[in-house]
Amino acid sequence: MGFLLSNYQLTICILLYSLIFCFSSSSSAHLCHNDESTALLQFKQLFSFNCSACDCSAYSAPFTDHWKEGTDCCAWDGVTCDNTTSHVIGLDLYCNCLYGTIHPNSSLFNLVHLQHLDLSLNNFNHSQILPSFGRFTNLTHLNLNYSSLSGPIQSSSREDWQGNNFTNSIFHIQKLQELSLAGNRELTGKLASFINGTLRHLRHLRSLDLSSTGFTGELPNSIGQLENLEELYLYDCNFSGTIPTSFGNLKKLRTLDLGGNNLTNGQFPSSISHLRNLEELYLDDCNFCGTIPTSLGNLKKLRMLDLGWNNMINGQFPSSIGHLKNLEELYLQHCNFFGTIPAWLGNLKKLRILYLPGNNLINDQFPSSIGHLKNLVELKLADCNFSGTIPRSLTNLTRLISLDLSHNNFEGPIPQLFSNFSQLQSIDFSNNQLTGPIPSSITGLPNLQYLYLGSNSINGTIPPSLFHLVNLTDLDLSSNNFSDTVELDTFAKLEYLFFLDLSNSGLSLTTTNSTPSSFRNITTLRLSSCNINKIPEFLKTRMEWLYMLDLSNNHLNEELNPLCNLHSLEYLDLSNNQFGGLIPTCLGNFSGYLMVLNLQSNNFSGTIPETFGYASSLKELDISNNGLQGVLPRSLVNCTNLEILNLCHNFIEDAFPFWLENLPRLMIIVLRDNKFHGPIEQPRERLAFTNLHIIDMSHNDFTGTLPSKYFESMYSMMMDDEDKSSVNYMGPRYGYYYSVTIMNKGLEMKLIRIITIFKAIDFSHNKFHGNIPISIGRLKALCVLNFSGNGLTGLIPMSLGDLTKLESLDLSQNKLSGEIPQQLTKLTFLEVLNFSQNNLTGLIPRGGQFETFSNTSYEGNLGLCGFPLSKNCGNVQIAESPTLPSSFSHNFKFKFDGFGWEAVLMGYGCGVLLGLLIGSCIIQRKEEWLVRIFGVKMCQHGKRSKKVWKKLAHTKSIINCL
Ligand SMILES: *[C@@H]1O[C@H](CO)[C@@H](O)[C@H](O)[C@H]1NC(C)=O
Ligand SMILES: *[C@@H]1O[C@H](CO)[C@@H](O)[C@H](O)[C@H]1NC(C)=O
Ligand SMILES: *[C@@H]1O[C@H](CO)[C@@H](O)[C@H](O)[C@H]1NC(C)=O
Ligand SMILES: *[C@@H]1O[C@H](CO)[C@@H](O)[C@H](O)[C@H]1NC(C)=O
């Protein structure tokens, strides 16, 4: 019985078990519908696999690889089926390297049961968003972000809508809850009509993302109709106008992002204060000025607030923010706040991230309130004018992961307090005046990945414990006062190092024991002025990732051939060494990435290799100050990206390289001091050298007349209306700028950065003859014009009076005759004038800047008379000396407080900035100031650099001058 029973029980058990088994297996292994399987396979076939065409950076093998005919499509990666009906209800092909067009009859549209569709981060090659999408009647989530879609989105016609023709337009997808179209720049249309024609019909829409698309127009009032929205992202479009009050209707909004639009300068929109459910608010870079209303304090649920890059002119820190007790992230960078950081900031106990860079906390002491924010993980206080020692009040912020105190005036040693900051991964103390050695509190931080201590006065030796920071990827010790000799390979112990900058650190690096296998992961290696006298072995091997190598200002005197393995280089700066021999041909063959090649001031000889013609990315070629001979290789005409070509001071013997006239980007060409010869003749093409900013052909043997036709096509030199609200430097990418040495105002001058509004022509010391062409007067943007030391004859053209930006005019040592045109007194920026050693006659004009020139400007012209010469003009009436021009008196009014910087006092227009540049060449410390004000901010903020200038509004003297 016992046996029977148990047998019976066993049977039941087996039965039950198999029932359960069958049931569960039938429900998990849904068999996909044949037509859907076919549709998916057909869809896959339409695309090629092309990851480089997609914006996706973190792709793995595409899902579609595993889609095989005859297998259950419900089991395929990226495909989701309904548990009961087995229909395909989800398709997720995010980041799958799909490249191709979506056609109206694509089999994709047969998957009519889809509820979730994500095709983002693929490349659909300008496909339009087709009406066929309307077939997905049950779709709730549609994500097409960053997938190269284009065109207007066809909105529904009224007839279709009324006739319930739901097959006809994407936005008859009545159930749609989430729509993401961000990053499709070619999607165009007015937001107003998109809302009216389409969006307002989508009653269930909760989330809408149109960021970085081509939608334009004013933000329409009708946006208030989208009442069910909980998330709205309109970042980085071109919306204009103001924020409409109807925004206040969107009561369910939790996230609102309107950053980076072209909104009209306006007050902070108070309608936003009605959105009581807001948790995240991004209004960065929106042109708001004025103060922040107290009503902002109503948004009690706010966790995230970004008001960065707005112009809260002369604003105090808005106390309303102090009421936002739930804030976890607060971004207020570059908001023009001034004064002290208030105590209430310490009440925001939940704050994890705080950004205050670039505010005008002039000479403020460090606010103790920040020390109360114990939950902070990220704290950025760059460029806030803080001074004193690094404050003790930071002691409690032991949860910090990232701390940025760069670009302030902190001084004294780095305190020990950081030893408790075990989470710390990133430290940026660069650009302060910190002294003392690198403390053990920093080298003891086990998780440190980024350590930036550049541009301080840190001294002493490199502590061996630094090399225990095995997680370091970025190390910047540049521009300090270390006194130590270190074997470069010691740094190679940090095996994850990507970025190493030891330039001007005071360190001497030995490389004699370097091994070929060091620094396998390095991408950027900057070792300028490190007393290196031997190329390290590892640089002679293939370095897969190295794209920037700076060995300038060392004592290297080898040949370059060993560097021929560095195929991935984009920047190579070997200037100011004693490298010799031939320039190796391999430099031109570098796999097409090479952008910057600076071989200035070495001992290279021989000819310039033809292979540069293959370096199609080349933007800067500087081989000045060497012993190069022969002709300029014609292959350079293939370098269509070339922006600066500097051949100064070699022995190149060639005719004028007219064949460069077509290079569309060429901005600077310096042929000074070579053996170029012959006439320049006329341009071969109608558009020649149209983008040129600086041309220096001085000290050669050019003959013939001045090339008047070229002056007629140098359009860039005619544009004197460039946007002065931004200072732009020439350079291929942020962090690296072109520099060039030119003769200006009688001095050899190194422009360490070249602002784009600086335009110059120097044809001095050649054998040009004939007249100065009248067409020169069209180059209205010229700052410097030098025709001295030629055989020019005839009159000084009156049209020179049109060069209203001119600061330096040198026509000395020619055979010019006649009177000095009165029109030149219009040149209010003219600071240097040299007409000496000509045959000029008559009365020197009076007025304007002419009151400031001394007799050296005119000497050697026997026929000139009047002020400032002692020679009287006899019976000629001498005009009353007019009052000083305003520009002149201004020249002596500017004073940069605390800088006492005479070089600034040079005039208006490009002169002020040029003055800044010159000043920076004169005194190193001033350069740092310059870099601080202009350069570094630009390089830190990339696309938003246009905002930098606005901040400068506070440096009143500069903005007044412009
Ligand atoms: C379908 O089944 C999966 C796993 O078997 C389960 O995670 C999911 O919740 C089910 N979905 C529905 C709608 O029942
Ligand atoms: C859409 O969903 C409804 C309700 O869930 C369902 O009855 C209908 O069959 C679905 N339509 C399609 C095409 O899947
Ligand atoms: C729906 O629109 C399509 C395309 O315009 C058209 O071919 C079809 O006849 C329309 N159907 C109805 C019922 O109006
Ligand atoms: C909205 O669209 C309808 C037709 O669909 C049109 O009649 C109306 O004028 C539009 N309104 C606005 C404000 O564009």
Image (cartoon, rainbow, N blue to C red):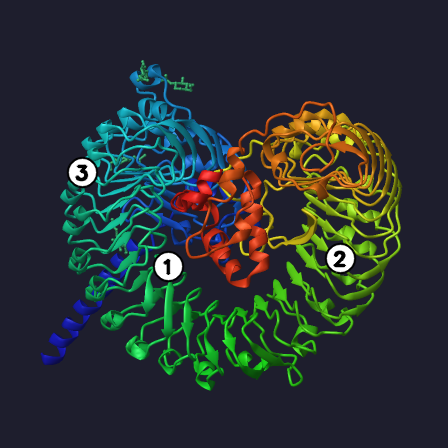
**Lateral position of residue 371 relative to residue 697, left or right:** left
What amino acid is at disc 3? Ser
Return the disc, 3 or 1, that comes first in the chain's sequence: 3
Does dot 1 land on a helix, a strand or a loop?
loop
Whether residue 754 sits left or right of residue 222 in the image: it is right
Which mark is first along the chain, 2 or 1? 1
**Which residue lies at the image location 66% right of the left edge and 69% below the top edge?**
553
Task: Identify the residue at horizontal 56%, vertical 78% (top origin).
Answer: 507
How packed is label 1: few (under 14 Cα within 10 Å), some, or many (20 or more)? many
Q: Nearer the viewer, residue 132 or 763?
A: 763
Residue designated by label 1: 382
Most distant residue in the top direction: 159
Pick the residue in front: 278 or 19. 278
Q: Is residue 795 above or below residue 592?
A: above
Q: Which residue is mark 2?
A: 624
| Quadrant that contains the N terminus | bottom left
